[in-house]
Image (spheres, rainbow, N blue to C red):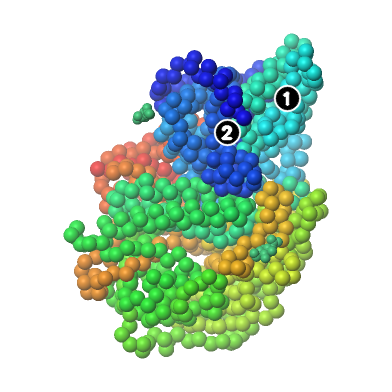
Amino acid sequence: MYISKSSTFVLLVSSLCLAVLPVKSSSGCGYDACNLGDPNKLNVHIVPHTHDDVGWLKTVDQYYYGARNNIQHAGVQYILDSVIHSLEENPDRRFIYVEIAFFWRWWNQQTNDTRNKVKNFVNQGRLEFISGGWCMNDEASTHYNSIIDQHSLGAEFLRDQFGECARPKIGWQIDPFGHSREQASLFAQMGFDGLFFGRADYQDIDKRTETKTRELIWKASANLDRRSWLFTGVLPNGYSPPGSFCYDIFCDDPPIMDDPRLHDYNVPERVETFIKAAHDEASSYATNHIIMTMGSDFQYENANQWYKNLDKLMKYVNAQQTNGSDVNVFYSTPSCYLYALNKVGRAWTSKTDDFFPYAHHPHGFWTGYFTSRPALKRYERLSNNILQVTRQLNAFSKANLRSSIFPLNEAMGIAQHHDAVSGTEKQEVAFDYAMRLSQGIDAAVDVINKAYDKILPLDSQTPPSGPQFLCQLVNISECLPIEGQERFTLILWNPTVHTISHHVRVPVTKDYTVRDPTGHVIVAEMIPISESTQKIPGRKSFAVNQLVFKAILPALGFSTYYFEIKATEKNNNEKQVVITQHSECILQNEYLRVEIDSQGNLNKITNLKKKISVPFSNQGFYWYGSFPGNNSGSEFQASGAYIFRPISSNPEPVSSKRSITCIKGQNVQSATIVFNNWASQEISLYDDAKMVEVEWTVGPIPVDDNIGKEIILRYDTDIQSESKFYTDANGREVLERTRDYRPTWNYSKVELISGNYYPINSRIWIKESNRQLTVLTDRSEGGASIQDGSIEVMLHRRTFYDDALGVDEPLNETAFGAGLVVRGKHLLIIESPATSALYHRVASQRFYMNPLATYALPPLPYADYSTTYRQTWSALQTDLPLNVHLLTFDQIDAKKYLIRVENYFELNEDDTYSHPVIVDLQKLFQSQGVISDIAEMILTANLRITDMKRLEWITNNNRSSKVDVKKDISLKDLNILLNPMEIRTFLVTVE
Ligand SMILES: *[C@@H]1O[C@H](CO)[C@@H](O)[C@H](O)[C@H]1NC(C)=O
Ligand SMILES: *[C@@H]1O[C@H](CO)[C@@H](O)[C@H](O)[C@H]1NC(C)=O
Ligand SMILES: [Zn+2]
């Protein structure tokens, strides 16, 4: 359809001189290219844009090509083709683009001519990249490590192809369903000047509209002060155009019919309606500038239709100025709108809380997606673990295989999308995300192998030790390639900068002796694999036992454990493992005592050293019935992929009885508590553990009663929590939550349960003066404290109804012909509030950066193996301080590295660790060489930190957002200081 217009384009194109443009900054882009309007008029910034979901109802590639248009008509390649043509037609026209996953796909297919045209538009500020991540990431279920990575991936592409003119300066989170404070803080650290989004709670929006505070300064960190401040605007109309002004092929609004000789001439009416729309909008905003988002989902496939009408509309509206109209309308971009607001020079209100949870009507709380697709949420988190380890191995082996890590990096970038890890995509698309991660992991395993091929051999003549492989199903105690083998090795790579003790469970069909890297045979106990595990659908393993042993792993390095089948079946360990059933089970080590009665009730956990006891009046699985509804009005809102709406506020216990098996070994003591045939937990205490592990297994969720179910694990204690609970944002800072309360508006509560749910990315706690119960999670989940003393975490969901927000499917995950079974872990910490941070901070970093286990079948017997291959290695001579985390270690080329180091403690959390800490960066490069050049960068590594100049904003109490420009790091002093919650990013060259 748009191709028929190409004859016009060809003429225009050929009249332009298409010299190859330098890929660097020109004064024509950025704020310099902004129209700031007329100070005496109402300035309407027209922002043409398209919202291109990186997968949702179709896969990312289907969206790119415009395949499967029967599902949803959408083809991003045509959008970009079409927009570029339209920009050529009129130099006033502007466009913004967000999702680099799509732009990258398109760019790869363009000729140099087209690329040069695009570079020209970018250098003139007419095509502006906004946000510039690989996707527009979800904010509730994403982890900060991956938010940073996905933005860095987009930023790197933009910098390489376009230079400084393409550096994103604005966050553009128009569609995500609630907004995290950490996201805003990270944006500020990426050098962004502002953030715009479309969705906020309807009560919040009402109040902000009334008080003209839809634009504000978000103080996005309790630790980073003004470095985290971010101007934030709630867009006027979601991200849609004002009513009756949509000119897309998807819309039916009247075009501008401007030839009076023709029928239906409508200019006066259109102009009047537009001027009224502008005044209406202006009435809820504080300045004489307003923004109109002219576009929506996958719009601009025929950009001409939009631009042709906008050109005319703007011309006729502005013509009314001679008749006294105060409306001044022009093409703009979000950054130019932001810049205009900045130039107004007023003071803005501020806020310190976040924008969770989001409700669009009284029964419509978007809190279900905090948990939706829990298996995908875990797979995404695990994939990040593998990605970071692969980068480290690539760097420390000097394998220089960065491009082979790209597939996993890209898959992770896509998985951060607000319909990906959020769980709000169609089932087919969820499978596609998982497949991408899986293929990315396969590519990463190749890198891991090439890295170990370099690291393991003790001399260069030695052949590789046999391929390393992952056993990705060890969470259901399955590792088929090692089953029945005479010998195998297990290498554990510890990605943290601290020596750790780590318990490993290896599913086996035979008994083995296990040797540590020094050749000592260590205690490895045969522990039976529970029946609940053995009957998980799809499990193929014959293993009924697992070997449990303790590994001590060096910082940023590995240890190899060598398994050799035992000659006789006689097992000395076995005697030490005591198994009882239906009787009381006390798990105890020197730190903790866990009391479980013969009925399978967890009654009490005592921290023996601190003499703190937390009795549980109840602990176990419950379910909420998912509200069935046809979504025809708020009261008929169904629970679905996005929305959590329980039928009743009283969840049902999944069973009235439980059975308990108690297993006591030397390395681990555990209680397997089976509630019914679809819900069980294994509570474990390892010998040296200072926290209790709860491994939960839920599914197939029964649906034979035709009721959708949302399964929670509840921990009911006597802690006097006084309506308060605490949840983290994206795995970093923790926010205080108060039941049935919102800090910035008078909350009228309707949904007693779902209105109190918040995202838990890594932790939730309740506390009183000297006791705190913290629950750490292995993936993002939703949770709340519905009663004082209680924590509940939603683990899994299966609903019968679609919630009418577009996905058009119930959330009904199945596998192997039954409802999907999901398994995961919680870690419970019982401490005083003053000592809790030490445990939850350290443990949550290790939880997401677990040692990576790779197995191999070495042909050599131990004696030969041990003289041929290195069995342990560390990149560090000594551990780094406990409050330091190595967030990124990415080798860019033979000599260059991108690194991020972080102090992951908050202020005032811990007497010892909530303080600035010094790291000698050279220590990280001991095995790589001497640092010969170093530059500190902004968080996304696309600008030197000394060049970061953010706009200055003033808050109501007359405080300026201005911060001192950071001094550059000097080669003479590589000792850097990390303040609490500070992440620092460096480009390092090593000789
Ligand atoms: C396109 O530009 C690149 C980089 O300038 C150059 O290497 C390549 O040869 C060009 N391709 C064509 C077909 O001109
Ligand atoms: C859920 O999935 C099961 C198994 O595939 C199927 O039998 C059932 O009809 C589905 N329910 C809904 C509401 O789609
Ligand atoms: Zn979207």
Q: Residue at x 68, y 42 (%)?
A: 199
* Residue 177 on image: x %, y %: 65, 47
Q: Are marks 2 and 1 in contact (CB under 8 Å)?
A: no
State the residue position of label 1: 255
Asked which quadrant contains residue 777, the reply is bottom right
Location of residue 373 with respect to 920 vertically, above or below: below
813 sits to left or right of 588: right
Q: Is mark 2 within 8 Å of ligand 3?
A: no
Location of residue 783 with respect to 987 vertically, above or below: below
Mark 2 or mark 1, earlier in chain: 2
Q: Residue at x 57, y 40 (%)?
A: 66
145 sits to left or right of 396: right
Q: Residue at x 68, y 55 (%)?
A: 809
Q: In this orientation, does residue 738 appear?
A: no
Between 609 and 217, the one lying in front of the other is: 217
Between 183 and 615, the one lying in front of the other is: 183
* Residue 237 on image: x %, y %: 71, 35
Residue type of the residue flagged with mark 2: Ile
Between 313 and 909, the one lying in front of the other is: 313
State the residue position of label 2: 79
Residue type of the residue flagged with mark 1: Pro
Question: Could you say whether the residue bearing mark 1 is in a helix, strand or loop?
Answer: loop
**Direction top: furthest residue:** 322
Q: Report how far apart the C-alphas of labels 2 and 1 lie in the structure.
A: 20 Å
Q: Is mark 1 within 8 Å of ligand 3?
A: no
